[in-house]
Image: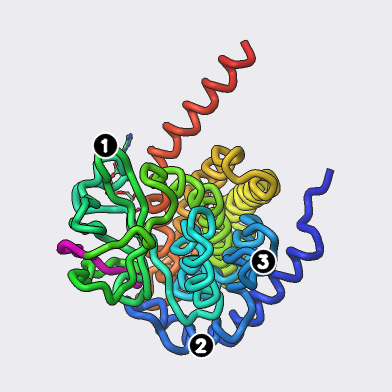
Amino acid sequence: MAFELDASYVELQEEARAVCESVAPFAAEADAMSTVHEGVFNALAATRLWELVVPASHGGRHEQVDPLAIAVVREVLMGTSCHLDSLFALQGIGSYAITAGGSDAQKDVWLPKVLSGEALAALALTEPEAGSDLKGISTVLSPNGDGYRLSGEKAYISNGGAAAFYSVLAREDQEYTMVLVPADSPGLTVTATPELASPHVLGDLSFDAVPVDSEQRLGDQGRGFDLVLATLAVFRLSVAGAALGLAQAALEEAVNHAATRQQFGKPLARQGAVAEMLADSWAELEAARLLTYRAGELARGNPAAALHHSSMAKLTASETAGRIVDRAVQVMGRWGLVRESKIERLTRQARPMRIYEGASQVLRLGIARALVDELQREA
Ligand SMILES: Cc1cc2nc3c(=O)[nH]c(=O)nc-3n(C[C@H](O)[C@H](O)[C@H](O)COP(=O)(O)OP(=O)(O)OC[C@H]3O[C@@H](n4cnc5c(N)ncnc54)[C@H](O)[C@@H]3O)c2cc1C
């Protein structure tokens, strides 16, 4: 039984650390932006990391996209820059429906561009009226002459406005379908999403009878949710990886402060209650890390079968990151509150992780359902 990452994953983390070093000088500037930071983009494009998000058939590093590889890389990237982490991960999140359900022609056109960064990718599911309950979407794909037209609104779409294409979930008759919509399609307009406390490249999309032909289908009619689930099965775990990286960075900030600042004649780190906060944070971080790596190991073989483990990892790691960053602020006292400090940035960035790619409460519903099903089956 192995509890450590294999050497190949440790090497991947080294690869990710190298880009972090080059991005660190402008990480804070990039993390304050809601458009793509050129320096971060160029630094990432100069690496081979995007090889991890496409399959070997189209230039990727692994036969199948490896969820654990993406998670361990995000763990490193997020410790330096949320912007860097998002740019890396979204190439996979936005394009995985092509990998899993696209035609050979779609793969040949788009995946090499995803890999090189020539085309940024985006996944458009959320709508003004439909978030956690995606079955409530109202974007519609309807027949139009020889082809179709797509009408509706999508909101809070990462890479919105920067992406070259969108993988869009829509209703079709009584079913759900996914289609690939190039960003320059007539009738597609992008407006800015409200600025978040933790800035993010986001856009709201409006589809006004956008012409779509059958070549733009991702998979057959009615396969939309299969592709959403396939994407989540690979990438939900990676949010856990990013949350670990954020928590590690927050804990390091707290330790650096507590080890050097003296009060009552000794370092804060030696004061009982502060030591307790540091110890709890380290223990919880290690527990979340083990859960994440184990879920990654399971997901590597069969991502869909391991979805509930990935959900548990995402739930645990993102909630843990929230607690660790909050304790770090407490340990740092007034220095934990300084605007534009690293800990302030981490505090803001931790919060959305408990909402996107499955809010914690919604994940718990799925996890509990899986638990009951499993125990009932065994009974
Ligand atoms: C930074 C960021 C990036 C994003 N990127 C994308 C993207 O690229 N593509 C995309 O499609 N979307 C994206 N989103 C949207 C994101 O997926 C949604 O915010 C998320 O699915 C939650 O939906 P909602 O915000 O509408 O919350 P709601 O669905 O309105 O839920 C609000 C809260 O209610 C609770 N809740 C909801 N349902 C239940 C339930 N059944 N039981 C118990 N509690 C419940 C949860 O606590 C939840 O946080 C992004 C959001 C953010 C913040």
Where residue 156 appears, x then y in whole percent? Answer: 28, 61
Q: Mark 3 Cα within 10 Å, few/some/many (few <14, many 20+)?
A: some
Q: Quadrant of residue 218?
A: bottom left
The residue pinned by badge 3 equals 56
The residue pinned by badge 2 equals 42
Image quadrant for the C terminus?
top right
Asked whether 185 or 90 is in front, the reply is 185
Colouring convention used in this rendered image of the protein: rainbow
Per the rendered image, the range of residues in magenta is 199-210
Q: Is residue 181 visible?
A: yes
Q: Amino acid at mark 1?
A: Gln
Q: Is residue 191 visible?
A: no
**What residue lies at 48% left-to-right and 60% top-to-bottom?**
98
Instruction: Give the residue at the far left of this rendering.
Output: 208
Q: Mark 1 Cα within 10 Å, few/some/many (few <14, many 20+)?
A: few
Asked whether 67 or 85 is in front, the reply is 67
Q: Amino acid at mark 3?
A: Ala
- Sequence-first tag of 2 and 3: 2
Asked whether 57 or 277 is in front, the reply is 57
Q: Mark 2 Cα within 10 Å, few/some/many (few <14, many 20+)?
A: few
Q: Nearer the viewer, mark 2 or mark 3?
A: 3
Asked whether 252 or 305 is in front, the reply is 305
Q: Is residue 229 magenta?
A: no
- Sequence-first tag of 1 and 3: 3
Q: Is mark 3 within 8 Å of ligand 1?
A: no
